[in-house]
Image (cartoon, rainbow, N blue to C red):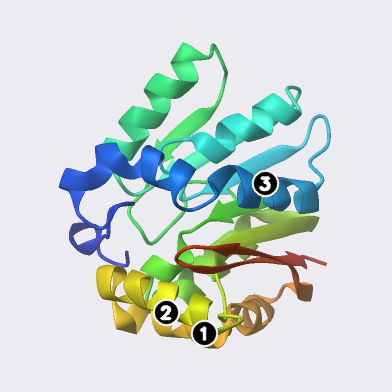
Amino acid sequence: MGNKEQYIPAAKYSILTDLFDPFMKYIMREEKFKNELLDEAKIQKRDTVLDFGCGTGTLSIMVKDKVMDTIVHGVDIDPKVLKIAKNKIDNKGLSIDLKEFDGINLPYENNVFDKVISSLVFHHLVREQKVKMLKELYRVTKQGGEIHIADFGKPQNLTMRAGFFIIQLFDGFNNTKDNLIGTIPSFMEHVGYKNVKEVQRVMTILGTISIYSGTKF
């Protein structure tokens, strides 16, 4: 992700992108963990929200479905998923601003967003990229704003570990090792977020989804 030419598509291989939504819905308990993420985010009317790594737009659309009077921005590195997201958003008649970015610098000013949300993005990034993107997210979060991340966390049992091994085979061992040992919260703290904690876990066929939250003071 640090290099535009080396980014990992949402479904690892771009040829599989069109299968991403059905996979998420039927295999990954998408509705369950994304609703848990939004419950923790407690998005309010007139909040400005960033969906980092918005993919095909499902989470951004869920924000508008829950709280219509919000300003939602989605950003992703993959133009193919952004095209799918735009079609889904247009079909629902929603207003969501989508942007493509270079994988390095987010196309926003400092201190813009009340809430930053992200779903299943960070396990695609190696450690250096995780920290760099968290620094960027911290930069664009308002003072008093919050970040809420749903991603693979430390497996809670052998079944979850076995499931996550499949993810590692598919997405890579180097970029998923920090998820395996549960160090994303420490990276969030490192870049400046406070009150960082794991607030929820959702078990899936392919491992434990952890939901992490933090605040910028």
Mark 2 lies on residue: 162
Asked if residue 183 shows in the view, the reply is: yes
Mark 3 lies on residue: 112
Q: Nearer the viewer, residue 95 or 216?
A: 95
Taking 188 as reference, is 62 above or below it?
Answer: above
Residue 207 rendering spot, x and y as whole percentages: 50, 70
In-image side of 2 versus 113 (left or right): left
Mark 3, Cα crowd under 10 Å, few <14 / some 14-19 / many 20+, is some
Residue 121 rendering spot, x and y as whole percentages: 45, 60
Residue 124 rendering spot, x and y as whole percentages: 37, 67
Q: Residue at x 72, y 46 (%)?
A: 38
Q: Secondary structure at mark 1?
A: helix
Q: CA distance from mark 3 to mark 2?
A: 40 Å
Taking 196 as reference, is 150 above or below it?
Answer: above
| 3 or 2: mark nearer the eye | 2
Mark 1 lies on residue: 158
Residue 163 rendering spot, x and y as whole percentages: 42, 72
Q: Residue at x 33, y 38 (%)?
A: 81
Q: Residue at x 79, y 30 (%)?
A: 46
Mark 1 / mark 3, whichever is N-terminal: 3
Q: Secondary structure at mark 2?
A: helix
Q: Residue at x 63, y 52 (%)?
A: 33
Taking 156 as reference, is 6 above or below it?
Answer: above
In-image side of 179 versus 111 (left or right): left
- The amino acid sitting under disc 1 is Leu
Mark 2, Cα crowd under 10 Å, few <14 / some 14-19 / many 20+, is some
